[in-house]
Image: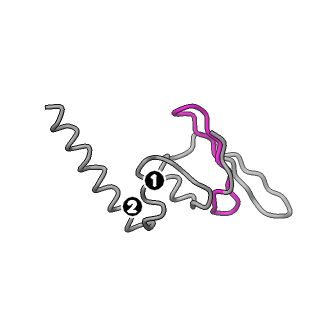
Amino acid sequence: MRAYCLNQAAERRKKRLLEVTKKFGKKYAELITDHKVTVGMTKEMVIESFGEAKYVNRTVTVHGTSEQWVYEDLGTQYLYFTGNKLTAFQD
């Protein structure tokens, strides 16, 4: 039974990896499938990887708008966006 469940999980991961690769390319597919992020990802990629943020804090200046996304599911993580791009994160 356990081997069957592991096989199902592997198949689901393989299917998701294929879908994500088609949508975002190989460079980001593994990270997204493994629920990880990296600088340069778009907001859509981060949502695909982590889901919706618990909190979104916006800062508006003369230079534009930046956002801090806060995730608290597996320890607190802070992600920082300038425009649509992830520019920094704390974990």
Q: Residue at x 57, y 60 (%)?
A: 41
How crowded pointer 2 is (Cα within 10 Å; few <14, some 14-19, many 20+) is rated as many
Q: Quadrant of residue 23?
A: bottom left
Quarter of the figure with residue 2: top left
Q: Which mark is residue 20?
A: 2
Q: Main secondary structure of the magenta part?
A: strand
- Label 2 and label 1: CA atoms lie apart by 8 Å
Q: What element does badge 1 sit on?
A: helix
- Where is residue 67 shown, x and y percent of the image? 70, 52
Place of residue 84 in the rendered image (x, y in percent of width and height, measured from the top left): 63, 63
Pointer 1 local density, CA inside 10 Å: few below 14, some 14–19, many at least 20: many
Which disc is residue 32 wearing?
A: 1
Q: Position of residue 77 (x, y in %)?
A: 61, 39
* Farthest right residue in view: 62
Q: Seen in the image, is 50 located left or right of residue 18?
A: right
Compared across the picture, whether 35 is left or right of 58 comes to left
Question: Residue shown at 32%/62% (left/top)?
Answer: 18
- Amino acid carrying label 2: it is Val
The answer to whether residue 10 is above or below residue 74 is: below
In which quadrant is the C terminus drawn?
A: top right
Three-letter amino acid code of the residue under disc 1: Ile
Magenta stretch holds residue 77: yes
Please state the extent of the stretch shown in magenta in the rendering. 69-86
Which residue does the image show at 46% across and 46% down from the upper left?
35
In which quadrant will I find the N terminus?
top left
Verify CB contact (< 8 Å) between mark 2 and mark 1. Answer: yes
